[in-house]
Image (cartoon, grey):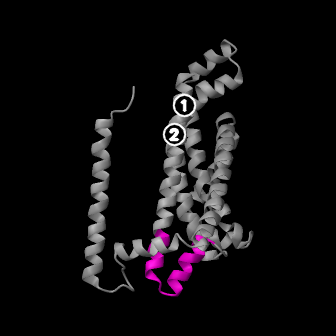
Amino acid sequence: MKPSTTSAKPRVGAALGAAAFWLLVWQAAALWLDAPLLLVSPVTAAGRLVELVQEADFWQAVLFTLSRIWLGFAFSLVLGLGLGALSYRFGWVRLLLAPLTATIRAVPVASFVILALLWVSSKNLSILVSLLIGFPILYANVLAGMDSTDARIIEMARLFRVPLGRQLRCIYLYQVLPFLRSGLVTAMGLCWKSGVAAEVIGIPDGSIGEKLYDAKIYLQTADLFCWTLAVVLLSVGCEKLLALCLSRVGRRDADA
């Protein structure tokens, strides 16, 4: 059944209205404070962003950080899928990984960054940090999805000698996909937050983190807001792209 366009329009309008409300609050706060060093107006930030997007350094920094966070996220997805499947199949693997995943979830990002700087160069720091942050989320969601699989369906598939590839696509993927969808979106957002935070601490050349650090050091408040807005837009864009890809995968499997 096709989604109703009439029901989608009010949601879009409500979202735009909420965004406009907070922009007005931001503008009012900037006018009331009247201290651009502490808080610039959205008009000033937007004007500076228009200037930045015309510079080559802006796009080089975006591509630098984007490629490394996506790489770390991809590694975390591969590990989450592989180790999640192994933990579902072998209880001793699940038992062995339980304290590791709990520790990774509990350790602050700053601690990860400081330790990671001892192992890798600052250039690849965001890859490792994104991997460590995204892995436990994806692992837990994959495992939860497999645990929810009906054992009777699996037994029936084995009884009728359904090929393993078809079992993976029609049974396991069908069960794991809803869990994986939420896990992927959450992990992507956290990978961006932790990856950029790692760059701010490690200060790799040509990264968004370096631009944020320089904006803080030189008291360039407008640039600080612009780069923060760029990170938010990139993170949301990546999340929407993942959600779109997963929805298409789900529809294709439903039609198969």
Q: Is 203 on the left-hand or right-hand side of 5?
A: right
User: What label does residue 96 carry, if any?
Assistant: none
- In terms of secondary structure, where does tag 1 sit? helix
**Which residue is tagged 2?**
179
For the C terminus, which image quadrant?
Answer: top right
Q: Note whether residue 189 is visible.
A: yes
Q: Which residues are magenta?
A: 207-228
Looking at the magenta stretch, what is its main secondary structure? helix
Dots 1, 2 in contact, CB < 8 A: yes
Residue shown at the point (28%, 49%) measured from the top left: 13
User: Which residue is situated farthest in the top direction here?
Assistant: 160
Residue 195 location (% of width, % of height): 59, 65
Whole-percent x and y of residue 79?
68, 47
Please provide percent x and percent y for residue 90: 69, 36
In this rendering, would 12 be left or right of 96?
A: left
Query: For the residue marked with disc 2, what is the amino acid?
Result: Phe
Q: Residue at x 53, y 35 (%)?
A: 248
The kind of residue on which mark 1 rests is: Gln
Please state which of residues 217 and 9 is positioned toward the viewer in this rendering: 9
Q: Position of residue 119 (x, y in %)?
A: 75, 69
- The residue drawn where x is 65% and y is 45% is 95
* Residue receiving disc 1: 175
